[in-house]
Image (spheres, rainbow, N blue to C red):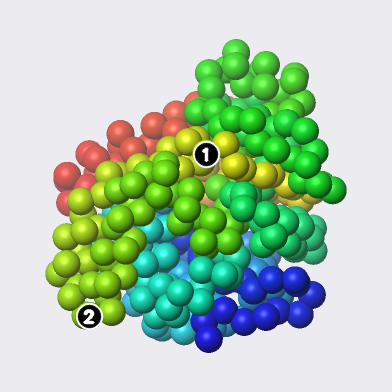
Amino acid sequence: MCASENSGNTCRMTALIMAGGIGERFWPLSTPTKPKQLLPFGENGKTLIEEAVERIRPLVSEDNLWIATSETLKPIFRNLRLCPETQILAEPFRKNTAGCIAFAVASMLAKCGDDIKNSVMAVLTADHLIKPEDKFIDAVKRIINFVSSNPLLGIIGIKPTRPDTGYGYIESGEEISEGIYKVIKFHEKPNSEEASEYLKRGNYFWNSGMFFWKVETFLNELRVASPQHYESILKMREAMIQNRYDDVKETFNSLPNISIDYALMECSSNIAMVKAEFFWDDLGSWNSLERIFTPDDKGNVIKGEWIGCDTTNCIIYNADKKDLTIATLGIDNIVVAVVENVVLVMNKHNTQKIKNLLSKYYDME
């Protein structure tokens, strides 16, 4: 059996951790072969993917844990031994989260058969910071127990602490069960005025990117919302069973490069949300370090060897293990990151534009 009864729950559960990032947001610390989920931003220097696995372990056995990643990263995850090798799924192409989940569900059906349709599937992130673990577990238990007996898609909403324009938002409605709320609508990333209004209203939540559903419910909803993704799951499943991997790749490559939010969640009216009572940060850019590490009395976040004068509100990250010291004088609101043979210097206001710099760097190599 691929899904087993877990003590403390009223339903069977399987978990998918999406871990296919390509290492852009924290460049040069992160790279295509060492993306954000492999960075040591967890407790006591643990990588984010290690923490993601440890967080869900109390609710799911190793045999029911799957990791979806790229062909490039699969050998790295295999060496980490976070789950059985046969459950590390290497997507042949990048097709966003809708493609990732479709590929994973096809793989689960091919390996486990129709029995897995009766299990609840948790779709989790590999590169977010979440604490404390017990409050995360409480939220997951609440939503999986609800969707196991109700044909709805589940999500965890994060109460916003600022008018952030970098997240999608969930508009919540009435409470339909204890701690469970009906979702009225998903909203795309807003402008600053809209984000401020969402914050004032109080019933708008950040989209955590974590989803929960009975596999059968997911398939039924997907068949209506995105028939192409639904049909691709059936085709890939049969091709996987028959070891026709060229056909799997062909079907997968035909999928649009869109998120599960766009393919499914924004189209469905059958969504329930549980409010997070835990700290959450998706670590979307270098600026995120100001929220997870304690600044000094000048507002600076410092990691590694550094000396400075008249340096304020800066992020200084020195990953060099040798005799290299970052020295700064008279700077404000700057990110300085030194990793191996690359020195990055940028204004903190530009951290979301780092992709523009990466294209030039990789063209130069």
Secondary element type, mark 1 = loop
Q: Residue at x 80, y 38 (%)?
A: 175
Q: Residue furthest top?
A: 193
Residue 192 spot, x, y in % from top left: 57, 17
- In the picture, measured across the screen, residue 306 lies left or right of residue 98, that is right
Q: Residue at x 67, y 62 (%)?
A: 148
Q: Which mark is residue 268?
A: 1
Tell me which amino acid carries mark 1: Ser
Q: Quadrant of residue 72?
A: bottom left
Tell me which amino acid carries mark 2: Gln
Residue 292 spot, x, y in % from top left: 67, 48
Residue 326 spot, x, y in % from top left: 50, 48
Whichever of callouts 2 and 1 sits on the residue coming sooner in the sequence is 2
Q: Residue at x 57, y 36 (%)?
A: 269
Query: Which residue is nearer to you in this view: 97 or 43?
Result: 97
Query: Which residue is nearer to you in this view: 67 or 36?
Result: 67
Residue 112 spot, x, y in % from top left: 44, 80
User: Which residue, given by chain and number where applicable, does mark 2 sit on?
Assistant: 242
